[in-house]
Amino acid sequence: MEDNKGESREDRQPKSNNQQGRLGDAEFVANLSHELRTPLNAIVGFSQLLNQQLKHLPDQQESVQMIEQAGRHLWELIDQLIDLVKIEGGVSPLNMEPIDIYSLLKECINLVNLAAKDKQIDLFFTPSTDPIYAMADRLRLRQIILNLLSNAIKYNVEGGEVHIAANGMEDNITISIVDSGIGIASHQQQNVFKPFQRLGAQFSDIEGTGLGLSISKELVELMAGEIGFTSQEFEGSRFYLKLLPANVEGRKGENAPVKKVIALSDPAIKQNLKLLYIEDNPVNIRYMKMLLEEFAGLELTTASTGEAGLEQVKLCQPDIILLDMRLPDMHGLDVLAKLTEDSKHSAKVYAVSADALPAQIERAMRAGIDGYITKPIDIKRLQQVLVA
Ligand code: ADP
């Protein structure tokens, strides 16, 4: 197997990614993200709905499925590109802490289990009894491991295998993911970590953007780690991560919260629920109306400005308020602040917004919002709100 590991680490300290973040950059990225996601909400949203409605017209359903698929691809591309811009611009600082590697690996393996089963790929993971802790940003490390695992499945063959292992040495922690897949030809290996390089996979029906590994490499290096691989065409690949160890005594593994997924016709969805949707964009309002038609006994009122929304709260006493963050007359958080001052209402307030950066979500959560739904709206996420 040829060795083509990432650059060697001259410096063992986490590199700076301009952690202060220039305001201009952060604002630019936030606006870019918002502007790109807003039209996507209509594309992915309506095609999801049409897909359900066209069950008896297979030809039309297939066309709509293609629109949805292309929309989702664009969505992934936008998410990843924005991620790359954020990392390179230093907009998204890392939160380095000791991470229980076994528990994180287990969480990631659970998340890809279904995709592996679909392709009849066996996943092997045998944690040792001793815990291993690395210094890393938990969410970012999870993102990297998920990328490696999903590649090991995507670029595998039916009936193939993926072996996951972690080893703790005194000066580094190594995570390795070995697959028995299609491998990478030696003349392509220098391009693996370059953005948009799919090394021929663009001609196959394997979905992807060619951005995952370049993002992973940037992130690992910001954590003072290293990513690399060895691969042999038609035999398989071994991707590895090396991370700084963390000395932690007696920490318990953190388990990921289990999300409840609800079927569209789930009876648990409350009846006679009054919903107020404060949103100025008519396309989003139309989409929400159509989406909620699925739920019998649900009453939807809309308001297109913050002021009108506050009026409606008094008039219709909603159980749930869905609140856009960028309203023509005020910011969603100002509406929330006014709602909090008014102790008479008992509604739960959820942001529904194309502002999807972690800092924006965190700001809303700190302001006391009950939950945050990002656009494009995922039907399942909305259902979770309706049964909460
Ligand atoms: P994506 O999977 O979205 O195309 P990545 O950046 O994750 O993008 O990977 C870049 C390319 O590297 C892939 O398109 C694929 O050709 C190749 N690749 C990545 N992982 C593997 C793997 N485990 N086996 C074979 N090829 C791989």
Image (cartoon, grey):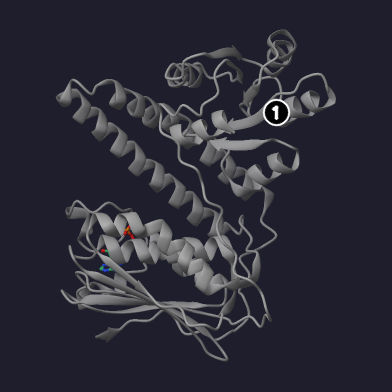
Position of residue 188 measured from the top left corner of the image (x, y, whole percent):
23, 72
Point out the residue furthest to the bottom here. Answer: 170
What residue is rendered at 51% in x and 67% in y?
104
Point out the residue furthest to the top here. Answer: 315
Q: Does the residue tagged 1 have its C-beta within 8 Å of any atom of ligand 1? A: no
Is 318 in front, or is 181? 318
| Mark 1 crowdedness (10 Å alpha carbons): few <14, some 14-19, many ≥20 | some
Mark 1, residue position: 331
Is 48 in front, or is 326? 48
Position of residue 66 measured from the top left corner of the image (x, y, whole percent):
24, 34
Q: Amino acid at mark 1?
A: His
Q: Determine the quadrant in which ligand 1 lies.
A: bottom left
The correct choice, above or below, for 6 with respect to 18 in the image is below
Position of residue 106 measured from the top left corner of the image (x, y, whole percent):
46, 66
What residue is rendered at 67% in x and 54% in y?
22
The correct choice, above or below, for 117 with respect to 13 in the image is above
Position of residue 64 measured from the top left corner of the image (x, y, whole percent):
25, 28
* The quarter of the displayed image where residue 200 is located: bottom left
